[in-house]
Image: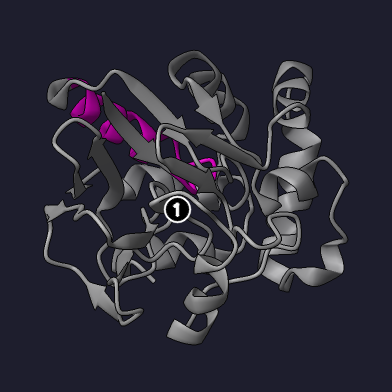
């Protein structure tokens, strides 16, 4: 099976459309979304509609939950909080119902997907160090756990001697006896100083993982963010991928 992996769309319609167009060219069997379809961006309802139609599985993310009133907004900075409040006021009822029923995790073959961390998916913690990664490896039994949340793509490879190393040498062959923690990056708001939208493809037959980047019409998205009256920084950051 070939799986397209997307995460952290954040209401960015132009980025989502560009990614799906590229995924269609690469031909996958299923598309899996790791959450945060909304928040920050100017097209929340449109993005939810597309994700509902195009994905086999979509997880819930912290911005999705916050827009449903299930996460205290005090946990967010003022720009994220303002964007969530704006998003909540504009979500269509169909989008709300879809997000309300999304799971926190999903297991398939020898893989698991989660938005934030496998050890406590509902707490929205971040994996920011190898120590954090070590705790996460103890929390799942599959060979690979795919995550999103931090908007920065990376692969942590745990070898049979329990040594971890950070990898960016795509494509990556998934080796037997190795385990992996993989961040698939962000479609709608990359933060690794590369403004191109990120997505990944997992080929479970070849046991291969690959990360892809695709440019999109950043200026159009920025214009819509500004026209909506959302914080200027949410538009500016898209140009520099941070």
Residue 114: x percent and y percent?
56, 48
Classify residue 116 as left or right of residue 203.
right
Q: Which picture quadrant has residue 5?
A: top left
- Where 149 sits versus 156, above or below? above
Question: Which residue is at a point 57% across and 36% down the rendered structure image?
Answer: 106
The quarter of the image holding the N terminus is top left
Question: Which residue is at a point 58% across and 27% down the rendered structure image?
Answer: 48
Classify residue 229 as left or right of residue 131.
right
**Residue 22 is covered by the magenta coloring:** yes
Question: Which residue is at a point 60% across and 35% down the rendered structure image?
Answer: 44
The quarter of the image holding the C terminus is bottom left
- Where 239 sits versus 111, above or below? below
Give the camera-side residue of 110 and 194.
110
Q: Is residue 112 visible?
A: yes
Dot 1 corresponds to which residue?
145
The secondary structure that dominates the magenta segment is helix
User: Over which residues does the magenta segment extend?
Assistant: 7-24
Residue 95: x percent and y percent?
70, 23
């Amino acid at each position: 099976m070939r799986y397209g992996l997307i995460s952290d769309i954040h209401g960015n319609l132009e980025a989502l459309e560009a990614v799906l167009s590229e995924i269609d060219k690469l031909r996958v069997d299923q598309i899996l979304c790791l959450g945060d379809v909304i928040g920050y961006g100017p097209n929340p309802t449109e993005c939810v509609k597309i994700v509902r139609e195009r994905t086999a599985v979509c997880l819930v993310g912290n911005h999705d939950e916050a827009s449903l009133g299930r996460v205290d907004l005090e946990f967010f900075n003022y720009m994220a909080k303002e964007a969530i409040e704006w998003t909540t006021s504009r979500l269509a009822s169909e989008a709300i119902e879809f997000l309300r029923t999304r799971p926190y995790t999903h297991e398939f073959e020898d893989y698991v997907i989660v938005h934030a961390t496998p050890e406590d998916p509902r707490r929205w913690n971040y994996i920011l160090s190898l120590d954090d990664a070590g705790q996460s490896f103890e929390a799942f039994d599959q060979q690979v756990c795919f995550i999103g949340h931090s908007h920065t793509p990376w692969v942590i490879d745990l070898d049979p001697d329990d040594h971890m190393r950070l990898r960016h040498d795509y494509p990556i062959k998934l080796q037997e006896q190795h385990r992996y923690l993989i961040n698939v990056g962000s479609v709608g708001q990359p933060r690794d100083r590369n403004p191109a939208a990120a997505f990944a493809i997992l080929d479970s037959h070849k046991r291969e993982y690959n990360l892809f980047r695709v440019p999109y019409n950043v200026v159009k998205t920025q214009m819509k963010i500004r026209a909506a009256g959302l914080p200027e920084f949410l538009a500016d950051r898209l140009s520099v991928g941070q």
